[in-house]
Image (tube, rainbow, N blue to C red):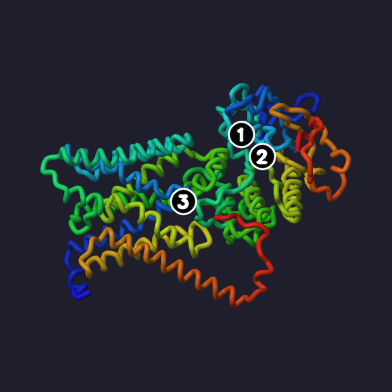
Amino acid sequence: MNVNLIEIMSLPFMQRALLGALITGLIAPSLGIYLVQRRMSLIGDGIGHIALTGVGVGLLTGTSPVLTAIIVSALGAVAVELIRERGRTSGDIALAILFYGGIAGGVFLVGLAPGKGSANLTSYLFGSLLTTSATDLITIAILGACVLVVTVGLRPWLFAICQDEEYAKVSGLPVRTLNLLLAVMTAVTVTVAMRSVGLLLVSALMVVPVAAAQLVSRGFGGTMTLAMLGGVISAGAGILMSAGYDTAPGATIVLAAIALFILVAAVGAALRRRRRADNGPAAACDPPECVLDS
Amino acid sequence: MSLRGELTGEGVNPPVLQIKHGAVAYDRPVLRDVNLTVRSGEVVAVLGANGSGKSTMIRAGLGLVPLAEGRVELFGVPLRRFRDRQRIGYVPQRLGAGGGVPATVGEVVSSGRLARRGFPGLPRTGDRQAVARALAAVDLTDRMHDPVASLSGGQQQRTLIARALAGEPDLLVLDEPTAGVDAKSQEAFAQALRDFVRHGGTVLLVAHELGPLQPVITRAVVVHDGVIAHDGAVPHPAGHHAEPGHDHVHPHAPQDPPSIWGRE
């Protein structure tokens, strides 16, 4: 790192980039944990594909791409939820068509838009943190707050429907409403993260910090807190590294998250090995009768 | 919390769950013209072989499986108009692994209280007490902060029962609660069930064999091949089935006609 990091970080556009990234790092795992719990880790990626069509619509009609991306990806997320609810095997194909239709539609529409440029498309696919304006930042903050109100505020309910949907139905929880709310919030999160890590890397920030957190946590609440912390650390470290090495911020953030995951996995394994060594073979005498493979 | 309908002249309690002429079909018929009435205060065991349709029957009763024909009433109200779902405590066969995201026993049991909590809202003292009581009822208080995945199969089953009890239901519906459960957990479960019934609860459970639950059961319904083959007294296992320690090993496929226990 031959450039003075402090000097770079004193630039207003770098500060806005950092703030935008930190917000994304905070909210993406708070939503992603529900997708992981449902074994739908890759759904965020698919919603990101659909959002590109929204961006295309925005650029073509001259409206804010963020607004159109939210609308189109929310519609897409609701469609995904309806397909999931049916639970058919053909749903798999339906999702594939929806996702690839989304990305192809986006590229197609961007091509039709006036003043088209592949640079424009790249900024949505891989993020464009450094061009974050003050207005963008306010939008990101408001949308992020909406997501947090739902993911943190409704945690017991969302936990219940993602943990055991049938049980939630029998006990009379508003399962459908909660599912649709979760779908719409997935779309909002994707749109927020579009700015920082880009539509193709959105899913990583939703899933990787959760994967790291669940290696060391014991409960759902703890996993969520740690995952959000991990997301913020990855985003911060990623921005600083990208400033130092002059690399793409989005990709650097994702690599930082993956590095964090590997670090946690290694430290966790070492701790477990030491604990087993400390306890000696006596610890092996009291195994649970039966353990669910997870 | 009065049940709709008073006691009738004969002193028969009002029905809590009724299936009338129920039929369920997936690719082939699974249940045909099933009639089941569970009355308040009863402990009804649904018995039958694997694939007999016994689980499907109670799942249809809860609205989890759509009926092709017939209808279901819960607490005297048709299923579609039934809103008091917090009165039902459902205990599924097993808890999903939840995609590897850990959850503590306390978190899972607390989710059973949501039906009573109102949406959305913070838990009140009464809610926390109900969760604590439910954990105590299945003897898992000391495991509250442990991840469910670290528990034995029997303890996980007890966690699910505690989740149902946390909602303080009037009807407990259990799907194979004793399958693959260790003796200590079976005993803890039987005790929890006895306490629940003593406080006026109604129980409908699906079982392959009754074990320590036998004395608690007031009525048995045997499902065989999609129809109810027996509805009445708990059938006593015949021959060496009755011997203590009989472990249901059948080295050769049974060629004899299905007994009251169905094909095993």
Image x and y of residue A18, in percent: 25, 62
Task: Identify the secondary structure beneath mark 2.
Answer: strand
Image x and y of residue A81, in percent: 42, 39
Q: Disc 1 is attached to a residue of which chain?
A: B
Q: Are marks 3 and 2 in contact (CB under 8 Å)?
A: no
| Camera-side residue of A21 and A245 | A245
Task: Identify the secondary structure beneath mark 1.
Answer: loop
Tell me what residue is drawn at x 35 percent, y 58 percent: A26
What amino acid is found at the position of numbered circle 3 in the picture? Arg
Image x and y of residue B10, in percent: 81, 25
The residue pinned by badge 1 equals B62
The residue pinned by badge 3 equals A155
Tell me what residue is drawn at x 22 percent, y 74 percent: A1
Residue found at the very far bottom of the displayed protein? A278
Measure how far apart labels 3 and 1 are at the Cα level: 26 Å
Q: Are marks 1 and 2 in contact (CB under 8 Å)?
A: yes
In the picture provided, is B118 more to the left or to the right than B89?
left
Task: Identify the secondary structure beneath mark 3.
Answer: helix
In the picture provided, is B128 more to the left or to the right than B36?
left
Measure how far apart labels 1 and 2 are at the Cα level: 9 Å
What amino acid is found at the position of numbered circle 2 in the picture? Val
On screen, residue A3 above or below A205: below
Q: Residues within 10 Å of mark 2 (few under 14, many from 20)?
A: many
What amino acid is found at the position of numbered circle 1 in the picture? Leu
Q: Disc 3 is attached to a residue of which chain?
A: A
* Residue A68 in view in this figure: no
Q: Are marks 3 and 2 on the same chain?
A: no
Q: Disc 2 is attached to a residue of which chain?
A: B
The residue pinned by badge 2 equals B173
Q: Are marks 3 and 1 on the same chain?
A: no
